[in-house]
Image (cartoon, rainbow, N blue to C red):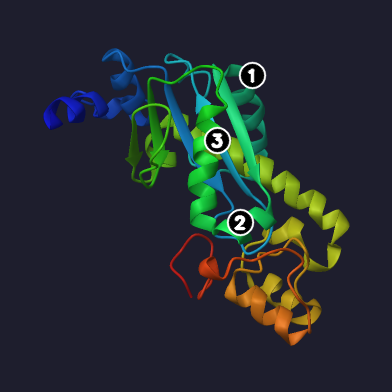
Amino acid sequence: MTGVLDGALRPPRAVLRRDTGTWGLQTALHRRGLGPVAGVDEAGRGACAGPLVIASCVLRPGDAARLDGLTDSKLMTAAARDRMFDLVRARAVDYAIVVVPTAEVDQTGVHFANIEGMRRAVAQLATHPGYVLVDGFRVPGLTAPSMPVLKGDQAAACVAAASVLAKVTRDRIMAELHEELPRYAFDVHKGYCTGLHTRALREHGPSHEHRWSYANVAAAGVAHGLRAPHRVALSVAATAVVQNGGPPQ
């Protein structure tokens, strides 16, 4: 029985050609009858301020030429991301974007919020996927069989498309927050723990858009005699700060 279940959840073995680039994996899945293939990725996991944004995206199998230049959103210029954002939304079979507010990240923890956001992003697709490719790690509880892909936003076009949708959406949210809270320069660092952001935190203390479950934010709050504006679950309070998606510092 175990072998049957494993076979139902894992894609049949397929040979991937080097010249297929980021479209190779999803093309192989389509040819094996496991399409439509959805890609899922997030933006803002390593930030200490602002929402977490997760996107899912289903691309047309033969759209590689029309989406030329599609890759990991972090490797693209802001202008290129904006152009690709519009193109993906126009060309995609389906997509969904989920915004997890700061308060929810603090209440559940960033990893749980990310996992739950990915589930929501897949569930909100009107086109039910036959298979889901997730950037980086396994996500239990999806509505279709799935597989984590190491550096998925550089390895699978549908994941790269999801990364563009998530990042551009979040960057625009952070630009709007800058209008409300200009002292933090959210339009520059987008809520990540840069030197500029750290200096603003030390000078002004955290705002309601900062993640109070993060150690650096909590410390700045204490220094300014401030309390979190929303509930922060003690069980998820961060003991370290994630720097731009890298290891804790």
Whether residue 60 appears in this view of the structure is: yes
- Which mark is first along the chain, 1 or 2? 1
Figure check: 228 above or below 223: above
- Which mark is first along the chain, 2 or 3? 2
Q: Residues within 10 Å of mark 1 (few under 14, many from 20)?
A: few
| Residue 129 position in % (x across, y down) | 43, 21
Amino acid type, residue under disc 1 in the picture: Ala
**What residue is pinned by disc 2?**
105
Identity of the residue drawn at 63% across and 64% down: 48
Mark 3: secondary structure? helix
Gap in Å between the C-alphas at discs 2 and 1?
A: 30 Å
**What residue is pinned by disc 3?**
120
Amino acid type, residue under disc 3 in the picture: Arg
Identity of the residue drawn at 66% across and 74% down: 217
Mark 3 against mark 1, which lies toward the viewer?
A: 3
**What residue is pinned by disc 1?**
90
Query: In what quadrant of the picture does the N terminus appear?
Result: top left
Q: Is residue 63 left or right of residue 47?
A: left
Identity of the residue drawn at 50% across and 39% down: 118
